[in-house]
Image: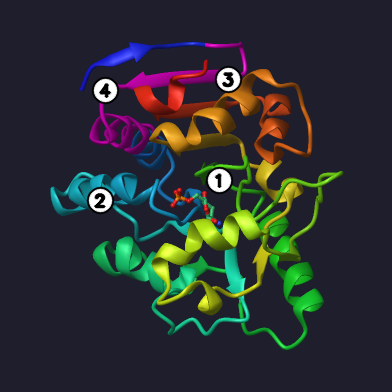
Amino acid sequence: MEKLYYGFKDNIKVEVFDSYEGLSRAAAAFIAERMKKKPDIILGLATGSSPVGVYDELTRMYEAGDLDFSAVRSFNLDEYYPLEPENDQSYRYFMNKNLFDRVNIDKANTRVPNGMAEDIELECEEYDAAIAAAGGADIQVLGIGGNGHIGFNEPDGFFTAETHKVALTENTIKANARFFASEEEVPRFAVTMGMGAIMSAKSIVLVANGGAKAQAIASMLTGGVDPLCPASILQLHPDVNVFIDKAAAELL
Ligand code: GLP
């Protein structure tokens, strides 16, 4: 697929593609190259519709015998709270369906925040400790919310460093209602990695497509670092790789 634009700042590369398939293939190729160099790579993973194409492409490479997930470890960004992992709207279920069940990853090496944890503060502390003990992710995959959220770090007056429980905004509840039977069924809370764990990743791979993401992408890259656009914190990260389509790049 044609690459339309490349480069942005020293620490942020933006690649714009004609199609969702194009950006997904390029983002997957970036991840695959690192995986081949480091088979025991630590992947930070994201849910939402945006990274599905990346997971499809990684699966295709695995099926072709080009990728081996046997030594890979992963930490997912977030999970609804409260929600059972067996619920087909949980992010654990999503990851199993879209990636883990399709490749040779050892599920014992995959972590998603526990959306049923009785002691949620302890769960958050343990999650951050596990990420830190692993040395942080080698690559953190991110989507972006229409309001600029990453993981479930919603627009606010400040950035939160630690993994934490968060109340979802009306905007996010509405945006995610399409996956549930009704808006009432969308959990009102989530557990999300904070900015500390996200920023500790050695490289960021952010994927976005469609005009609904154009404002968030423009604010993230050109609006200055502002917790009202949580993704803008990535301007302070040393290695950000943004893969987007033309529609999402419209306001750049
Ligand atoms: C969700 C997730 C985010 C995701 C975002 C965008 O709320 N918590 O991690 O990036 O929304 O989702 P989508 O890719 O479906 O547009």
Is 24 located above or below residue 50 in the figure?
above
Q: Earlier in the sequence, mark 2 or mark 3?
A: 3
Which residue is depicted at the point 49% across and 53% down? 46
- Say whether mark 2 is within 8 Å of ligand 1: no
Q: Are marks 4 and 3 in contact (CB under 8 Å)?
A: no
Residue at image mark 4: 18
Q: Tell which tag, 4 or 3, sits nearer the viewer.
A: 4
Give the crowd class for mark 3: few <14, some 14-19, many >=20 residues within 10 Å: some
Choose between 186 and 118: the one closer to the eye. 186
Closer to the observer: label 2 or label 1? 1
> Can you see residue 120?
yes
Which of disc 1 and disc 3 is earlier in sequence? 3
Dots 3 and 1: beta carbons under 8 Å? no
The residue depicted at 28 percent of the width and 35 percent of the height is 20
Residue where numbered disc 3 is placed: 12
Is 20 magenta? The answer is yes
122 lies left or right of 207? right
Alpha carbon distance from label 2 to label 3: 25 Å
Residue at label 1?
145
Q: What residue is disc 2 on?
A: 56
Disc nearer the start of the sequence (2/1) = 2
Q: Nearer the viewer, residue 45 or 251?
A: 251
* CA–CA distance in space, label 4 to label 1: 21 Å
Q: In the picture shown, does residue 76 fall above or below 41?
A: below
Name the secondary structure under disc 4: loop
Q: Residues within 10 Å of mark 4 (few under 14, many from 20)?
A: some
Q: Residue furthest left?
A: 64
Measured in 3D between alpha carbons, the distance from the residue under mark 2 to the one under mark 4, in whole angstroms, is 18 Å
Q: In the image, 81: left or right of 176?
A: right
